[in-house]
Image: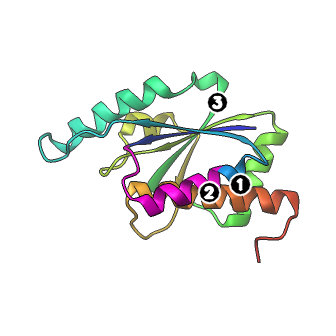
Amino acid sequence: MRIRIVAVGKLKEDYLKRGVDDYIKRLLRYVKITVQEVAEEDINTKPGPEVKAREAQKLQKQLQPPESRYMIALDMRGTELSSEELAQKLESLMVAGKSNISLVIGGALGLDDSILRAADLRLSLSKLTFTHQVARFIILEQLYRSFKIIKGEPYHY
């Protein structure tokens, strides 16, 4: 399986960079994983819909064609899954031969509707609000936890 994370913005905080790098290294035992960052738009100088539309254009350039990937968009209004349910979803995708997963993380204002409509799954990490940088760390930890669950390895208690 290949997982490609396409995210708006660069990680700024060193502690998040270290955490994200750690989980990427851990995940490489199970999957091929890459992270592609696109530049954030300035939310202070443009209206929100324009910011999201411009970020969506950048994200779409980094995504594989729809027929060759399964796209998961992080969305606060999306479906909430437990760790076990996320593991089951990933395992079912593998069994179905969907080996290219694109996971899309928006910027400070979230994702444009064009990205959300194109997603195969809209996933919410929680009812809590997280910065998009923290969301990247959380989803990587949950992906790692999912693969530990799939493999029956200790980590999830």
Q: Is residue 9 visible?
A: yes
- In this rendering, position of residue 81 left or right of residue 57: right
Magenta portion: prevailing SS class: helix
- In this rendering, position of residue 67 left or right of residue 42: right
Percent position of residue 135, x then y: 47, 58
Q: Residue 69 carries which label?
A: 3
Percent position of residue 17, x then y: 48, 55
Q: Report the Cα–Cα distance between label 2 and label 1.
A: 6 Å
Percent position of residue 119, x then y: 53, 38
In the picture, the quarter occupied by the N terminus is top right
Instruction: Residue at 83% x, 70% y: name it.
Output: 154
Magenta-drawn segment: 9-24
Please state which amino acid type lies under the numbered disc 2.
Asp
In front of the other: 119 or 43: 43
Question: Tag 1 or tag 3, which sits nearer the N-term?
Answer: 1
CB-based contact (under 8 Å), mark 2 and mark 1: yes
Q: Report the Cα–Cα distance between label 3 and label 1.
A: 23 Å
Q: Which mark is residue 22?
A: 2
